[in-house]
Amino acid sequence: MSQGMTISARVRRFQADDEFYTSEGCFITEVSNSADDPEISIARARVEPGITTGWHRLHNIVERYVIVHGCGRVEIGDLPPTDVRAGDVVLIPPMCRQRITNSGPEDLVFLAICTPRFRDQAYEEINDA
């Protein structure tokens, strides 16, 4: 935690109605992402069956996918495409191109945990991948 930063105890309620669709092809619900907790953000991502998200990368942010429900295939950097399922954790370094495909019959749901917290200006679409 940053020097001088004070975190207050609290409970943040999940707001399912706050889900929004992104240009990369998935639905996002911000679970925790605020300036008063800059070290981390947590978002719930939902990818519908048969959908592949757009190639993208994050500047200066490490991202982790914690697969909660469903199955998919993740593509990260130069690694071969890798199948993932509930319980798997995917580690994505900063500036590493990434996308995920829902390869199953149900929604693929995962937590996207970013350190430091996700900010829109850190996001970059990659159209030539």
Image: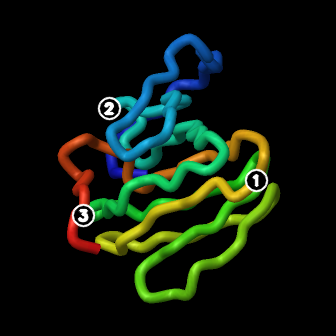
| Contact flag, marks 2 and 1 (Cβ < 8 Å) | no
Say which amino acid is labelled 1: Gly
**117 left or right, relative to 45:** left
| x then y, percent, for residue 37 | 42, 36
At numbered mark 3, what does the secondary structure look like: helix, strand or loop? loop
Write down the residue under mark 2: 35
The residue nearer to you, when weighing 32 against 108, is 108
Write down the residue under mark 1: 104
Instruction: State the CA–CA distance, disc 2 to disc 1.
Output: 36 Å
At numbered mark 1, what does the secondary structure look like: helix, strand or loop? loop
- Residue drawn at x 62%, y 50% is 50
Could you classify mark 2 by the number of other residues whose Cα lies within 10 Å: few (under 14), some (14-19), or many (20 or more)?
Answer: few
Q: Answer with mark 2 or mark 1, whichever residue precedes in sequence.
A: 2
Comparing labels 3 and 2, the label whose residue is closer to the camera: 3
Write down the residue under mark 3: 126
Q: Answer with mark 3 or mark 2, whichever residue precedes in sequence.
A: 2
- Residue drawn at x 42%, y 67% is 98
The residue nearer to you, when weighing 22 against 122, is 22
The residue nearer to you, when weighing 44 against 62, is 44
Could you classify mark 1 by the number of other residues whose Cα lies within 10 Å: few (under 14), some (14-19), or many (20 or more)?
Answer: some
Say which amino acid is labelled 3: Ile
Compared to residue 9, the image places residue 102 above or below, namely below
| x then y, percent, for residue 104 | 76, 53
Comparing labels 1 and 3, the label whose residue is closer to the camera: 1
Compared to residue 60, the image places residue 41 above or below, namely above
Instruction: State the CA–CA distance, disc 3 to disc 2.
Output: 27 Å
Could you classify mark 3 by the number of other residues whose Cα lies within 10 Å: few (under 14), some (14-19), or many (20 or more)?
Answer: few
Compared to residue 22, the image places residue 124 above or below, namely below
